[in-house]
Image (cartoon, rainbow, N blue to C red):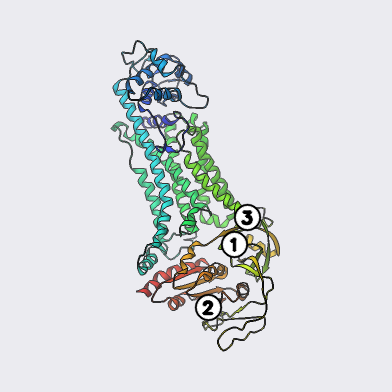
């Protein structure tokens, strides 16, 4: 019981004793200054006044546990004995402060700073003049305060130390919140800058192959682990471990030193408050990581999928901290019989709303539910997260009225969320409403052409006339950015089929012009034709329709309106320009992503492509033209069968110099290639 009472007592210190501030406590906001004045106030506010009401409850001023009476703000503001006792104590204890500072405290903070709060009936100086003769005794706290009293040195020191410890704990919490947030933004930048440090290339490759790229255990990263969750890579696991450890460490250190009998009380109260502060800081960080317009994507080489993975893990940490924060105070209120009153207060209601929604979001965001009910997940996740963010704001607003800067974390989180949404709208507005031309290639694939628009990397496409979920959008890699006004049949790609057992060499992979068979001269070059061609901007996408949902519905359309959110460039491909040897592996429509790498390459490059049908290969080669899929680039195009990735790597990886492997395809293909370079390439270099 005593522990719970002390928790409530100290927690209410920050309830209503400050003007609205900006920043964080210790960083723009000064808390409990002057401490001597607050110590005098809290030492005397425990007395019952002649105008106090008898009955159970909490003192409206200092939050001290009830002694069978309740004192209103108006009572404090008008009771002469209370005002004079506080004024005399301040006069004795705050000798180093200017009169103007003491007058400012008296007028603004003595009674509190709630909306419509009453003010002391007299100024500090006026009240002090009426304290004559000065008090010469210490009235027992068990008696009604019917005369001016002194504050004993013991009582004053106890309150001073308590307030000072609380203030330092609040400053420490601000610092720890900043550590969480700043390191969360700085670590991706610092790790990305390491690529400019001239480490030995062989050492870097070995390190990445064993400590960064492979899954944390097993062989699956893109494929779900027992269909429950995606395993992080070892590099991602290091980041997750950091965020977990730093939160645990910051929750366990630098608590105020108090007397033995109050140690547990102080510790529990500080743990609850620190849980809440770190939860807010993590909330801001996870919102930053969630945005597809996250500024860290532009200044680091970390992928969006990595940030989303960290977003999910930080959300778990954030939610656990919020739940523990709420649980400690819930237990305290139940123990002292105050829950029936507190649960009706607006701050408590909004806090519970936020915690409940955050708790619902965790299981609702699990991989099986995301995959089965993706559109429902997307809409509910957005709505629940936004309401939880609003709930966090109103929780601290109605509790502290924007006095201590706790809402600063909510402002930061909301600014990241708003920036991402505004940038999405700006990208959409820039491109306007366009017309998408749909061409069905076969039972597995379609082609989407959007004329008169340019972009690079990948784009998010909205088809508002297909579904009532007008906000539904999907990312697609851009294969082409131009279209010929006058088109001759583009090169026909020679492909190895399921019945072919002979791998293609460079000559067999050469491109031949069509519709008629075009001869190859003695020098191995394709003769020039006289057909003139003009080009216009056009985005070309190739989409697999083997699943269910929006992409399948597109097969029944020929022309429909589309909104294009672009461009989202793959900045991580920039490093491929300098790598002497590059192996590109694509599965199905994954060719669209690797073509981006193909265009920027100047060194040795080999493309290996596995597809279900020839129609996709012909359509892609027709779209790209002869300048991209040149004979020296195509290593193998396998139709109706899987690529032998082990053989490809053993044959194509050079023994001297770097080799980069880029893959875009099914999850099984990606996991197999991530596993094989970690072993095959490292072994080759040795």
| Residue 563 in sight | yes
**Rendered-image quadrant of the N terminus:** top left
* Residue at the spot of label 1: 455
Q: Secondary structure at mark 2?
A: strand
In the rendered image, residue 67, in percent from the top left (x then y), is placed at: 40, 21
At 48% from the left edge and 36% from the top edge, which residue is drawn?
Answer: 396
* Residue at the spot of label 2: 636
Distance (Cα) linking label 3 and label 1:
11 Å
Q: Secondary structure at mark 1?
A: loop
In the picture, residue 327 is in which quadrant? top left
| Residue 373 in sight | no
Q: Is residue 116 left or right of residue 256?
A: right
Instruction: Give the label on residue 368, or none.
Output: none
Q: Sequence order check: which comes first, mark 3 or mark 1? A: 3
> Above or below — where is 282 with respect to 189?
above
Q: Sequence order check: which comes first, mark 3 or mark 2? A: 3
Distance (Cα) linking label 3 and label 2:
39 Å
* Residue at the spot of label 3: 430
Q: Is residue 347 left or right of residue 472?
A: left
Q: Sequence order check: which comes first, mark 2 or mark 1? A: 1
> Label 1: how many residues lie within 10 Å, few (<14), some (14-19) or many (20+)?
some
């Amino acid at each position: 019981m005593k522990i719970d009472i002390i928790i409530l007592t100290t927690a209410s210190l920050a309830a209503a004793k400050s003007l609205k501030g900006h920043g964080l406590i210790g960083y723009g906001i000064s808390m409990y200054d002057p401490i001597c004045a607050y110590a005098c106030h809290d030492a005397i506010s425990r007395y019952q006044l002649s105008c106090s009401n008898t009955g159970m409850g909490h003192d409206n001023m200092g939050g001290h546990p009830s002694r069978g009476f309740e004192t209103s703000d108006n009572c404090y503001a008008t009771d002469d004995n209370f005002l004079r006792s506080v004024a005399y104590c301040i006069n004795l204890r705050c000798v180093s402060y200017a009169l103007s500072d003491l007058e400012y405290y008296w007028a603004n903070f003595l009674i509190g700073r709630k909306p419509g709060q009453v003010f002391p009936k007299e100024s500090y100086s006026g009240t002090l003049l009426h304290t004559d003769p000065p008090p010469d005794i210490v009235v027992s706290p068990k008696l009604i305060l019917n005369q001016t009293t002194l504050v004993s040195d013991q009582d004053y020191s106890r309150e001073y130390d308590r307030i000072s410890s609380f203030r330092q704990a609040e400053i420490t919490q601000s610092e720890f919140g900043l550590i969480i947030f700043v390191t969360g933004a700085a670590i991706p930048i610092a790790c990305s800058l390491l690529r400019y440090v001239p480490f030995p290339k062989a050492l870097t490759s070995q390190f990445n192959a064993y400590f960064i790229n492979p899954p944390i255990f097993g062989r699956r990263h893109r494929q779900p682990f027992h269909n429950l969750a995606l395993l992080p890579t070892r590099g991602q696991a290091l980041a997750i471990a950091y965020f977990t450890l730093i939160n645990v460490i910051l929750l366990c250190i630098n608590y105020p030193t108090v007397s033995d009998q109050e140690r547990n009380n102080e510790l529990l109260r500080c743990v609850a408050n620190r849980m809440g502060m770190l939860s807010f800081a993590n909330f801001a960080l996870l919102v930053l990581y969630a945005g597809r317009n996250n500024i860290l994507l532009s200044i680091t080489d970390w992928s969006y999928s990595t940030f989303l993975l960290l977003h999910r893990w930080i959300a778990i940490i954030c939610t656990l901290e919020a739940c523990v924060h709420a649980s400690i105070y819930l237990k305290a209120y139940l123990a002292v019989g105050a829950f029936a009153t507190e649960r009706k207060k607006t701050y408590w209601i909004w806090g519970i709303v936020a915690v409940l929604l955050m708790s619902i979001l965790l299981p609702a965001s699990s991989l099986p539910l995301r995959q089965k009910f993706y559109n429902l997940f997307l809409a509910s996740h957005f709505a629940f997260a936004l309401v939880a963010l609003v709930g966090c704001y109103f929780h601290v607003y109605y509790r502290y009225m924007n006095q201590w800067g706790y809402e600063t974390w909510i402002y930061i989180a909301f600014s990241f969320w708003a920036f991402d949404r505004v940038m999405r709208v700006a990208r959409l507005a820039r491109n306007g409403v366009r017309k998408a031309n749909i061409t069905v290639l076969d039972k597995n694939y379609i082609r989407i052409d959007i004329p008169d628009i340019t972009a690079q990397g990948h784009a998010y496409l909205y088809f508002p006339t297909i579904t009532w979920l007008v906000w539904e959008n999907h990312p697609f890699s851009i294969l082409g950015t131009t279209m010929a006004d006058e088109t001759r049949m583009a090169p026909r790609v020679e492909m190895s089929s399921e019945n072919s057992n002979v791998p293609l060499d460079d000559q067999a992979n050469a491109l031949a012009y069509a519709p008629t068979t075009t001869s190859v001269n003695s020098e191995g070059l394709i003769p020039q034709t006289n057909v003139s061609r003009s080009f216009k901007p056009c985005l070309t996408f190739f989409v697999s329709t083997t699943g269910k949902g929006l992409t399948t519905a597109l097969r029944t359309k020929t022309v429909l309106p589309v909104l294009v959110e672009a461009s989202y460039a793959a900045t991580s491909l920039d490093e491929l320009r300098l790598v002497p040897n590059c192996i590109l592996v694509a599965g199905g429509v994954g060719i669209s992503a690797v073509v981006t790498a193909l265009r920027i390459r100047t060194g040795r490059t080999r493309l290996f492509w596995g597809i279900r049908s020839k129609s996709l290969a012909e359509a892609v080669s027709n779209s790209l033209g002869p300048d991209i899929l040149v004979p020296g680039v195509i290593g193998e195009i396998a139709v109706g069968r899987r690529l032998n990735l082990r053989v490809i790597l053993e044959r194509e990886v050079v023994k001297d110099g770097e080799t980069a492997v880029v893959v875009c395809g099914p999850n099984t293909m990606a996991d197999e290639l991530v596993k094989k370079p970690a072993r095959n390439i490292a072994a080759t270099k040795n």
